[in-house]
Amino acid sequence: MADAKAKPKKAAKSGKKSTTKGKAETLSFQAEMSRLLDIVAHSLYSDKEVFLRELISNASDACDRLRHDALTAPELAAGDGDYGIAITVDEAANTLTIADNGIGMNRDDLVENLGTIARSGTSAFLAGLSGDDRKDTSLIGQFGVGFYSAFMVADSVEVITRRAGEDTAWRWFSDGKGSFTIEPAEREARGSTITIHLRDDDKGYLNKDRLSGIVKRYSDHIPFPITLTEAGGETEQANTGAALWTRPKSEVTEDQYKEFYHHVAHMADEPWSVLHFHVEGVIDYRALLFVPSTQPFDLFQQDRESRVKLYVRRVFITDKETGLVPPWLRFLRGIVDSEDLPLNVSREMLQDNPVTAKIRGGIVKRTLDDLEKKAKEGGESFDGFWTNFGAVLKEGIYEGAGERDRLVKLCRFRSTAGDGLVSLDDYIGRMKEGQDEIYYISGSEAEALAKSPQLEGFRAKGIEVLLMTDPVDDFWVPMVGVYGEKAFKSVTRGGADLSKIKGGEKDKAEDKADESDLGPLVAAVKLALGEKVKDVRASDRLTDSAVCLVAGEQDMDIHMERILRAHNQLNEVSARILEINPKHALIKGLMEKAKIDASAPVLEDAAWLLLDQARILEGEPVTDPAEFARRLSKVMAAGLG
Ligand code: ADP
């Protein structure tokens, strides 16, 4: 179904009238549409037969929509409550016809739906185009291009349609080359008839057996009968015709689940997981839900809405704002069919309805059960899921879900221990003797984080640090605070006393000696930088770098502050603590200088350069670029002299 919110262009932008011949108007396709059609028509896409799946899918949606509208306006379906889809083959005319008695379209619907890019998947398809024919062709499979896929096999396509409740029928016709015509037409009753004039190369689609096979393969799950008729021949039903989710699990094949998923989710990947269950008792509902194996393109859309469709007693009700799936499970696709909700249930009624709440609880529980099972099985499969949807799932932790503990346990992280993903249980299981905190660092990229100077001391002691790269991490980690009785501790905040943790080959005695000589330098740097830093102190976490910045124990973590600033929720930049490494050659040299003359001008330049260096390491701009360049040149020139 078209997602109205995602529509990139209003219909008014296209459908520009160019000529009028008799009663037929010729209108041009929206510019992007022409491009799409050109690619579809010339594609060497190997699975051309999916065009039939797309047209049947549209016909099924049209029946669903009318059945839904007729709940409140029964006259719309008057005289014909038996919905169905009829495929007819006419070898003599070289045509294939797909007819439905669904909601139909009027003139405006035709211009809007079949003249512009109505569906969000199609616009994502266009956005993904690279200009490389081979790659672009594979996108057809990835996004599906709906109705327009007919042009993979058609010289021309004709649509005769009449909107339920209206008297006039309309004919839409196009050869897919830039324009289409619309004119009044005759159709006995409501619904749409799509006639495809097959290209010479694609006449194979006139073979009834082949068509029957295609329907079985892709459309068996369609809950309306699909009939197949040869001109002058017999009619047979090509699909089972009962809603797939009402069948017992044992009778549904993996392929049937897959095809239903493609239909319901508009996704072309394989489902990563299928959840099919029937709950009976106080309330009665069925659910057939899928976890995709790739990220849907709209996963991070602002509305964070679920796309799971609600049915009531087999009748499609809505796929908008059902409240059946929490935002942090919005990657789920599929349907829920309730026996208890009234057919005329409204959005408002759904929002605070005990039945909705019960179903939501059930979906959450079953989904987490399934994820836990898969996590236990472990391996790359769960890591793949986590990479796709971990960031979404983690939203559930800070949204106060009652499932917080279960969610935290499912979390996976990159870490300094290697390339794979680790769980908190893995982490705790290999903590060093004397370590009682879960160390982590947050930022936007794991590779950059792994190089942070703040990690040096941890690395030297072989202490594992989790690398957190999703923006939500900065919110849920401080909120959860503790896992398995171990507190989370950011390595860029507060002190880091690693001396109590066993490991590495640090020689504390030597460190202490160095630090005692640090006083004059610390004083000189503090004097130079004033309020630009909160404190200057010797570092326990540096081994190779000269300096780094950390946040005070009570301050906001550096990365968190950056996120808030990026979202204009914070204007001030708090002063940081500058930690210096007494074992670094540069610092040693400066310590010598400071001991002899704490007011030597070179110390002031050095102080600012150290601060700027630490800022650069954080990915922050230098304090004052002009001053930075001046001081750097001065120090370098002195070094040369
Ligand atoms: P999608 O089905 O994903 O929305 P399509 O490009 O296949 O995208 O179809 C665009 C729109 O055209 C549909 O959303 C629907 O409104 C309308 N449409 C297509 N086929 C039919 C049909 N058989 N009956 C009624 N409307 C249809």
Image (cartoon, rainbow, N blue to C red):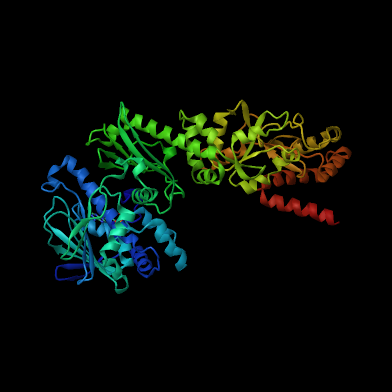
Classify 600 as above or below 12: above
Residue at x 47%, y 30% (from the top left corner)? 403
Classify 365 as above or below 247: above
The spot of residue 381 in percent (x, y) is: 52, 46
Furthest residue toward bottom: 200
Which corner quadrant of the figure contains ligand 1? bottom left
Total labels: the figure holds 0
Left or right of 266 in this view: 625: right
The spot of residue 285 in percent (x, y) is: 31, 34
Identify which residue, 567 or 43, lies in the foreground: 43
In the picture, the quarter occupied by the C terminus is bottom right
Is residue 618 visible in the rendered structure shown here?
no
Q: Quadrant of residue 572?
A: top right
Left or right of 4 in this view: 460: right
Left or right of 74 in this view: 114: right
The spot of residue 330 in percent (x, y) is: 41, 41
Residue at x 50%, y 39% (from the top left corner)? 374
Is residue 210 visible in the rendered structure shown here?
yes
The spot of residue 474 in percent (x, y) is: 56, 37
Classify 541 as above or below 85: above
